[in-house]
Amino acid sequence: MCCSSFQSEIFTLHRHFLSAGASYPMTPLWKLQLYEVSDATGPSAVILPRVSYNFTANTDLSVGGQLFASSRNGEFHGLSHVVYVEYTLHFR
């Protein structure tokens, strides 16, 4: 057992955030998603684009990223961009 009382806490520099998201099915097999979280007092933002392709009824392949833009005093300052590939197998 851990001694830290802050184990499940989320720490942030600022208190006011705004988020938005959109999803668009380009075809029955391709889907485009875009999410954004902004720090209203920072200013800074993280943009989360994602494109997914449905191979079969139970498999998906996605490519996405976490793109950060921030001023020196923003919440997301100093974080590196992340790009990922995800293969998902759904069990029924």
Image (cartoon, rainbow, N blue to C red):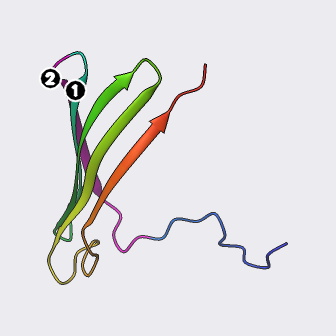
The stretch drawn in magenta includes residue 18: yes
Relative horizontal placement of residue 53, taking residue 71 as reference (left or right): right
Between 81 and 70, the one nearer to me in the picture? 81
Q: Is residue 88 above or below residue 38?
A: above
Between 73 and 81, the one nearer to me in the picture? 81
Q: Which mark is residue 44?
A: none
- The residue identified by callout 1 is 30
* Quadrant hosting residue 67: bottom left
Number of marks in the image?
A: 2
Q: Amino acid at mark 2?
A: Met
Residue 1: % across, % down: 85, 72
Q: Residue at x 43, y 29 (%)?
A: 59
Between 18 and 30, the one nearer to me in the picture? 30
Tell me whether circle 2 and circle 1 mark residues in contact (CB < 8 Å): yes
The stretch drawn in magenta includes residue 88: no
Q: Amino acid at mark 1?
A: Trp
Q: Is residue 38 above or below residue 42?
A: above
